Image (cartoon, grey):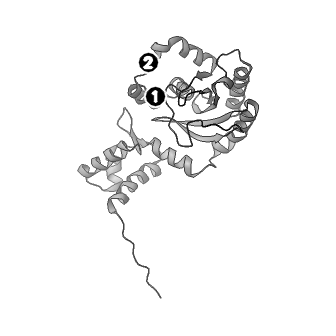
Amino acid sequence: METKKKKDTISSLSTGISILDVIVQAKKPLKITDIQEETKVTKTNLYKYINTLMQDDLIFRDENGLYHLGSKLIQYGMTAIGNQDILVSISPYLQSISEHTNNSALFSVPTFNGPVIAKINRSNQILNIGAEIGTLLPPNSSTGKIFTIFADHQKTKSWKEKHDISEHNHAEETKTIRKEKIAFAENPLISEISSVSIPILNYTNELIGIISVVGFSSDIPKTLQDPVSEYLQTMQSKISMDF
């Protein structure tokens, strides 16, 4: 019987993956002492691994010193699989919105680094929306505005600090977005391409996702009075109720 040859591997990479596995299996944020206890990595080396993983957004350290899985892992996961429950549930809505508006409809999920695109329903229009699945959207996008206002404090704290965001600087817009549950943005990624977004909230008003309509600026609404805006607000209420 032929003996299977052992392939060369990098032990340090396996150690880094084992740290991620510990957080995954715990199903909750962990202290560094918890991680050390499970991995048996010396404290000096563990800090090096932790710093490297944080630098690459594979893990995230919150204000209480607890370590969470990072947004890069969510990007990888969303890119690798498109059949998660929430994506399955949201897909028919994205298709309806895309067909109704004749524009691309995106679904983004909130992460510690900001909103990440998890699903795209493209329109028949030939245009570059400037983003793909796994893209981290910026604060000046309509998606970014919704994230800033509706995501929980733990997720937005470092985001606001990193991008120097203060709701006081846009008090009127913030007040309107919070009340009307819709945000507008012109040319956030590419010239002549604009967007409008709505938050998807669960029964506790937790932000579970953001739906955005993206297209040529001439086709995207800019005011609450636009019929498309009114349609999206109706959809926001309906979809959130379903979740």
Residue assigned mark 1? 156
The quadrant in which the C terminus is found is top right
The 10 Å Cα crowd at callout 2, few under 14, some 14 to 19, many 20 or more, is few
**Compared to 198, does 16 lie above or below?**
below
Residue furthest to the top: 172
Figure quadrant of residue 6: bottom left
**Compared to 101, does 133 lie above or below?**
below
For mark 2, give the secondary structure. Answer: loop
Figure quadrant of residue 239: top right
Mark linked to residue 239:
none
Say if mark 2 contacts mark 1, CB within 8 Å. no
Residue assigned mark 2? 166
The nearer-to-camera label among 2 and 1 is 2
**Which amino acid, mark 1?**
Thr
- State whether residue 202 appears in this view: no
Q: Residue at x 56, y 42 (%)?
A: 132
Q: Nearer the viewer, residue 135 or 35?
A: 135
- State whether residue 53 appears in this view: yes
Residue 62 percent coordinates (x, y)? 39, 35
Residue furthest to the left: 44
- The earlier-in-sequence mark between 2 and 1 is 1
Residue 5 percent coordinates (x, y)? 41, 78
Q: Residue at x 31, y 44 (%)?
A: 51
The 10 Å Cα crowd at callout 1, few under 14, some 14 to 19, many 20 or more, is many
Q: Nearer the viewer, residue 154 or 221?
A: 221
